[in-house]
Amino acid sequence: MLSVQPDTKPKGCAGCNRKIKDRYLLKALDKYWHEDCLKCACCDCRLGEVGSTLYTKANLILCRRDYLRLFGVTGNCAACSKLIPAFEMVMRAKDNVYHLDCFACQLC
């Protein structure tokens, strides 16, 4: 959960350890952040902008894409019907998703 709070006294940034002298504080994982320091742990994209969504799990701060890649579910393989974990590489064809090993030509 990201919250913006008025700054009552300077606090240290969890990202850079410098004092936050901005008018507002960003708070995530019960820590305070500069707008530029609040980033996704995987891809380093900025999450401190107004309207940004962030996800936390296992004490990581993640963007939506990386959260789904690491912890989400992709779906079932169109060829073998087994579950494909979100972190696994896949092949897509139209609306179908396949394991890499299951993606093959039906004719040959």
Image (cartoon, rainbow, N blue to C red):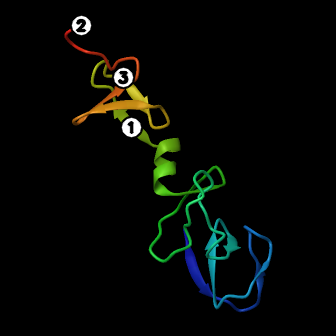
Q: Which residue is mark 2?
A: 108
Circle 3 SS class:
loop
Dot 1, crowdedness within 10 Å: few (<14), some or many (≥20)? some
**In the image: residue 35, left or right of residue 77:** right
Type of amino acid at the residue the image marks with label 1: Thr
Residue 85 is situated, as x and y percent measured from the top left of the image, at 45, 33
Question: Counting residues from the N terminus, which is met first, the one under dot 3 or under dot 2?
Answer: 3
So how many labels did they put on this image?
A: 3
Q: Is residue 105 above or below residue 75?
A: above
Which residue is located at x 66 percent, y 54 percent? 59
Q: Position of residue 38 (x, y in %)?
A: 63, 68
Q: Nearer the viewer, residue 70 or 101?
A: 101
Give me the disc on residue 14.
none
CB contact under 8 Å: marks 1 and 3: no
Asked which secondary structure carries label 2, the reply is loop
Tag 3 residue? 82
Which quarter of the image is occupied by the N terminus? bottom right
Question: Looking at the image, which residue is at 65% across and 65% down?
Answer: 29
Q: Earlier in the sequence, mark 1 or mark 3?
A: 1
Q: Is residue 84 depicted above or below 57 in this figure? A: above
Of residue 53 and residue 45, the one placed in the foreground of this image is 45
Position in image of residue 11 (x %, y %): 77, 81
**Mark identifier at residue 74:** 1
Of the 4 image quadrants, the one containing the C terminus is top left
Q: SS at mark 1?
A: strand
Seen at 46% across and 47% down, the residue is: 68
Residue drawn at the location 66% of the way across and 69% of the way down: 37
Left or right of residue 9, residue 24 in this image:
left
